[in-house]
Amino acid sequence: MERTYLMIKPDGVQRNLIGEIVSRFEKKGFTLVAAKLTTLSKETAETHYGEHKERPFFGELVSFITSGPVFAMVWEGNNVISTARTMMGTTNPAEAAPGTIRGDYGVQVSMNVIHGSDSPESAEREIAIFFKEEELNTYEKNV
Ligand code: CMP
């Protein structure tokens, strides 16, 4: 079963959007495998966003993502990587479609509420940055 790493950014946490966002993925039918509220170190942020190191906004990105707690999550389900990104909307919230998380809750690209892995390789790498193997829960839904 596919897994992805999703992270509610400091703006989403501070605007009390954790419950709303978690609820969307629950209602969609995905399974929450792990979650924690955590404040990223500069080192962890730079590792997570390593692919953007040469971008002009890298400093701003690291500074923002370490500015307050994030809600780090692992979700599991059929096609969860791509479907979660569809549910999130495009990177720039000002252009994201209404009904998507970014389309409904954001206006600035630097504060776009949520991050989601963009490929199976990214998901594996990002899950390993934030969670130990024993923190990933495996369970059947019996209800
Ligand atoms: P995310 O999906 O977390 O991945 C990289 C992040 O870089 C992206 O969301 C945006 O929040 C951020 N980003 C992309 N473009 C810009 C930009 N021009 N200025 C500031 N931040 C940006």
Image: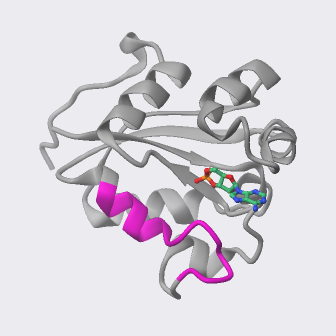
Image x and y of residue 3, in percent = 29, 38
| Quadrant in the picture for residue 114 | bottom right
Rendered residue at 86%/47% (across/down): 60
Rendered residue at 71%/35% (across/down): 53
Write the start and end of the magenta stretch as one range.
82-96
Image x and y of residue 45, in percent = 71, 30
| Quadrant in the picture for residue 87 | bottom left
| 29 shown above or below 49 | below
Count of numbered badges drawn on the protein: 0
Is residue 134 inside the magenta stretch? Answer: no
Rendered residue at 21%/53% (across/down): 79
Is residue 87 inside the magenta stretch? Answer: yes
Q: Which quadrant contains ligand 1? A: bottom right
Q: Quick check: 70 left or right of 68?
A: left
Q: Quick check: 102 left or right of 66?
A: left
| 85 shown above or below 69 | below
